[in-house]
Image (spheres, coloured by chain):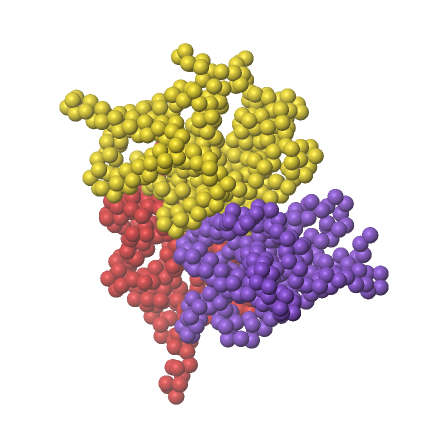
Chain colours: A red, B purple, C yellow
Amino acid sequence: MENNFILQTRNLTIHFGGLCAVDSLNFKVRSGEIRGLIGPNGSGKTTFFNIISGIYKPQEGEVWFNGKNITGKRAFEITRKGIARTFQNNRLFWQLSILDNVMLGMYSHQHARLFDVLLRYGKIRKELKDNAEKAVEILSYFSPELSDLHSRLVSDLSQGDRRRVEICRALASDPKLLLLDEPSAGMSPEETEKLMDDIGKVTEKYPDLSIIIIEHDMMVIERIAQQVIVFNYGKKIAEGSYSEVVTNPEVLEAYLGEELEDAES
Amino acid sequence: MVHFLEVLFIALMLSSTYILIAVGFTLFFGAIDIVQFAHGDVAMLGAFISIIFYGLVEVSGISNILPPWIWILVIIIGSLLITGALGVVFERVVVKPFRRSPLLMVLVATVALGIIVRESVRLFYPEGSNPQVFPVFFPQAGFRIGPLYFKAEHFIILAISIFLIFGLMIFINKTKMGLAIRAISQNREAASLMGINPDITIMATFFTGSLLAGIAGVLIGSYYDVVKFDIGLMGGIKGFSAAVVGGLGNFQGAILGGLTLGVVETFASAYIPGGMPYKDVFAFIIVIFFLVFRPSGLLGERAFEKV
Amino acid sequence: MVKKHFGDIGLLFLLQTVFFGLIMVFLIVEKIVLVLSVIFGTIFISFLIVKLKPVNQFLQSLFNKYKKVALCWGVLFILVLPLLLHESPYLIHMLFMAGLYAVLAIGLDFQVGSTHLVNFATAADYGIGAYTAALLAVNFGWSFWVLLPLSGLAAALFGFLLGLPTMKTKTYYLSLVTIAVGLIIYLLLNNLSWTGGPNGIAGIPLPSIGGFSFGSVLNIFGLELPFQANFYYLILAILLVEFIVARRLYNSLIGLSWNAIRDDEIAAQCQGINVTSSKIMAFYTNAFFDGLAGAIYAFSVGFISPENFAFMLSVIVITMVIIGGMGNTTGVIFGATIMTLIPEKFQVVQSYRLWLFAIVILVMLLVRPKGLFPQKIRQYS
């Protein structure tokens, strides 16, 4: 596999029962790139993320990350190698505080062993304290309110703040690849504006971080993505810049279906 | 020396009673993704309620006036209906409040419910801690087919179970309510958008499952001739195990699972010397084996959660 | 300024002493009416304290300011209890049992409270610890002090082996397996010849330390304490160790990852947490302490039988965790204590005990599912 791609998939395929959710997918992302991933509902975008992050195992094909074959590896192993993600339906740890959530993002670098916890407790406490400071730093970079309120339970937050915490948690693991799954889902236009600023801040602070972002809100894609890929029925149907992709007739058909043809005839 | 076919027959009969309980577990899991740990005790209640009805019938002298098959039928149907209703009550009180809560809540709550039901019988039913004689509902005659000896009662038990299992299949597949139950199993929101009332459907599910458990209780009571307040604990665990082995949420799985468990248990206690007291252990070992190597069961569980 | 400190500390002493006095009254008094009035009085007062904000805040700030003093006074009281009760060996034994259940409950809290793993096999771990200790002591004469950690390890091994295959399965399967395993262990203990069958194992000798046998009277400050006090102090020591372990686990990434698994397993995996191995760890740490408790129990009563390790014990311990507070070690100790002591006082309803426990579980789950003392938010500084 070629080396300047941080992520590469070859012939990636997964079925669920009779449905082929991802079909012979070849996908490449470079270091530091920001890729948009769009497509109609059910086209396999989230499934693709789930395979990359190790939640699903593909039936065929390979996934290569940072020069290593990670096909079929389990989710926690993949996270420890440097892939972090957010979820469409916002999977935060609801009964824990904001700070706890971000601290858990750091787990991949610091998984504590029983021996250390029981017998080298002082060292463990110090490590946690340092991590807590780092976590507060990450939070304050995005929003001073969040870092001030870090002992609040995440269930008390607004949608925009929740998404922010999820992104902070993902960043806390110091990833090389960040997968954002419909981050603007459920947000008002103002919140979406703030989200785009946040993502801008991420790219500023972490210039080498590659990002793949699934979105339905085209404004976000237009503003943020350097390259866009379009999925339909589990296959890649177009690739290019935003303006190229948006005028591609196959893409339009995928989104609007037969109506466009009927309308035109 | 017991003949192989006789053992097989007993195994089938026992299996059919397990299936009746397992089907409840699978229905409940299919409909609302929960496990009702007190379901076995619902079966026990079915048995005890029919004992109470039998007592009433004796005392009121009805048994002398009407031919036996009439009042036996009435007793059985009456117990079933009450057991079904109790099942619905249990769902409203102990399951519904925890619909949006973590799974642990409904699990522990139904375990607690089971204890309350069991202990209530032990404490408040006269002589509750002792085994109770189960009334004779079915003819006790035996008959021979060649070298084999069978009891009429066992045939009747098997026949009733098979009848009910088929009845359930027809209910699920061919009636409107059955369709509703299948719909909410697949997708509760979509079903309610189609005009199906999920609450009523859930209640119907619990009524049906509990009714079947009730009859299982009556059949088990008839087979063993005694019942005790704690038969529901074992019965429930075995019923649940059968449902799991077959594939939780899968109706045919419940049948297959019940058969597997019943056959293993009966054959183990018949043919393994000294195996009798351990018959329950064999059943559990099968379950644990399945959970380790094939957790989705023989025929596969329902779909996983959406990520 | 000094006067204010003394005044506040004095007030703290007074309040605590009154509370301890209530506890003493509750323990000593025998008339049901009086016991009930103490219980309801305490509930009423606690209710008031919780609801009346100014009182609540005042008390909280008082305790927070002089935490160390309050703690010392509390610890002193606990240590001195047997002296105050030196005429009632039965009460001291009851306190010992409360401590034993607290050990079981804190262990179970790792699984049920922190991780939401429903485990009904506490009685099995406990029984394995007890029988390991009893069999080796009675048949081979091994010393208690060797058997204590050994029983813990035996139970932990069992927990580990049990956890290994079951951790990959879902919650409801886990509860089924743990119930089944509990029943299997009970059946085996009841039927195997070398475990003594239904008669169990008798004649377990008393432990001794440096020539002093645990069966002999304890002489402190001229007072003669019945031998039950020896076991009371022993269980306090174990409880202290377990408490420290529990606190350390809680305040580390291990405890945090357990909570993460509780809240969202998939998200937890995606933070790099090996969910299966974390769950197994919850399993065997729980089992270890259950095993310790089992060994201590065996040696304290001298005779064990399968009846002591029935499914109901698992249910009782889960009740204590649910009532006390899931994920809150102190809460769980409190839950274990009241759930041991209160039923003991109402001997007349002994046969209703299980029934009442189950009703309490249901009520608690419906009304206050997080327990009397819910888990607190972690502080890192």
- The reply, left or right, for residue B157 in relation to residue B76 is right
Residue drawn at the location 49% of the way across and 38% of the way down: C350
The percent position of residue C1, horizontal first and vertical second, equals 15, 23
Residue C282 visible in the snapshot: no
Residue C83 visible in the snapshot: yes
- Name, please, the residue furthest toward the bottom: A265
Q: In which quarter of the image is the C terminus of chain A?
A: bottom left
Disc tally is 0
- Name, please, the residue furthest toward the top: C222
Residue closest to the eye, C184 or C381: C184
- Reply above or below: B210 against C22: below
The percent position of residue A62, horizontal first and vertical second, equals 53, 58
The percent position of residue B244, horizontal first and vertical second, equals 59, 56
The percent position of residue B117, horizontal first and vertical second, equals 51, 51
Say which quarter of the image contains residue C337. Answer: top left
- Reply above or below: B253 against A128: below
Residue drawn at the location 53% of the way across and 27% of the way down: C296
Residue drawn at the location 69% of the way across and 32% of the way down: C194
Residue closest to the eye, C111 or A55: C111
- Reply above or below: C342 against A12: above
Residue closest to the eye, B19 or B179: B19
Say which quarter of the image contains residue B252. Answer: bottom right
- The reply, left or right, for residue A130 in relation to residue C123 is left
Residue drawn at the location 63% of the way across and 66% of the way down: B64
